Image (cartoon, rainbow, N blue to C red):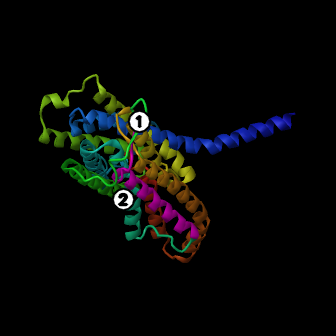
Amino acid sequence: MGGEGGAEEKKGKQILELLKDPLSMILVQVLTTGMFLLSKAVLNKGHSVFAILTYRCIVGALFVLPFALYIERGKWKELNWMVVFWIFLNALMGITGAMGFYYYGLCDTNATYAASFLNLVPVLTFLFAVVVRLERLGFDSRGGRIKILGTILCVGGAMVISMYNGATIHITSPKWEINTVKKGFDAFSNHKVRGTLFLIASCLCFSTWVIVQAKLLQRYPFKYCATMYTCVAASLQSAVLGLILNASRSKWILRWNLELLLVVYSGALNTGAVFCLISWVVPRKGPSYATMFNALSLILTTILEAVFMIGDFTVGSLIGITMIIGGLYAYLWGRGHQLPSKQIRDEESIIEVSTPQRVEEDVYCSQEIENLSVQYQNPR
């Protein structure tokens, strides 16, 4: 009986071990979806973008501060002017620039459209890494080809959701009505074109941020301290830009409304909790595993925006969601089959190369770029 009880307990632990990683990533996407929808609701009321960013970064810094003091106590002594420069650049690209452009793009579009653009960031980051020879395309293996196909499907699905409508299903109606008049690709309005340009700029900033933060952590490998300092730098940058653009006192007063909720929610949960969850899962499962769960936030955003924000659910959305789910499983399957052969090639290359220090630096930077690409929707 004792042996059977021990076996059942062991089996239960194994099941928990299998489930806790995907459940953690699903929780990350649920929190991210809440940030997308809450941001849209607040920005619709005309609140200042950089005021929100300033307060969000302050809350984020305060949330991460205890972790930095407890886990990385005394590491502030290793700061130097070069590290400060990378922290400033990291904040400028990852928060002030990327999130600033994203919020302005969100003002001119909707949550689903803006969220779909963020699915371009892993692809752009991957392409940047290929250009600087930190990644390979992987066409030489079946797993690599399937992984690339899955990535294309995910991005294609995101683009279908954002650009193709098809028949419109009015979910908010007591009886679902299908309107087949509005089909095909909508002509962009002036505001939508402007919003699209802002979102493209945001994607470029996010992709550059991934590279910059990898370099920062290479020089200052203390993630909690780096996160806290980045939030402080971004709050100062956002405050300066916000005051230049609009110094009206009314724009900087936090009231007991959705704006305050967004600041606390995005600062504490998206900066703090999401960072901790990702930092816990990535070393266990790898960055590619976490990256592809980002598409789930787009699916949740599409559904919840249609239901709660009086939006329409279209056939194009259904097609796009199907493509994203198919791409997700294709990518994970390809990654799983590519990993063994990649490990063998890495071991062989380490044996053959006669400059181990340079190899160690390149491998570290490559891993950090891949690790950080999973966090593009939740910058510090």
Q: Is residue 230 magenta?
A: no
- The mark lying in front, picked from 2 and 1, is 1
At x 37% / y 61%, what residue is drawn?
124
Disc sitting over residue 211 in the figure? 2
Who is closer to the viewer here, 359 or 204? 204
Quadrant assignment for the C terminus: top left
Who is closer to the viewer here, 222 or 143? 143
At x 85% / y 38%, what residue is drawn?
3
Q: Earlier in the sequence, mark 2 or mark 1?
A: 1
The three-letter code of the residue at mark 2 reads: Ile
Q: Are marks 2 and 1 in contact (CB under 8 Å)?
A: no
Image location (x, y in percent) of residue 38: 34, 34
Image location (x, y in percent) of residue 308: 38, 32
Q: Quadrant of residue 74?
A: top left
Image location (x, y in percent) of residue 347: 58, 70
Who is closer to the viewer here, 288 or 210? 288
Q: Quadrant of residue 146?
A: bottom right
Q: Is residue 159 magenta?
A: yes
Q: Is residue 147 left or right of residue 61?
A: right
At x 25% / y 42%, what residue is drawn?
107
**Most extreme residue toward the right, as rendered?**
1
Image location (x, y in percent) of residue 123: 40, 60
Who is closer to the viewer here, 113 or 314? 314
Mark 2 to mark 1 CA distance (whole Å): 42 Å
Disc sitting over residue 171 in the figure? 1
Disc sitting over residue 251 in the figure? none
Q: Which residues are magenta?
A: 142-169
The three-letter code of the residue at mark 1 reads: Ile
Q: Is residue 7 left or right of residue 231?
A: right
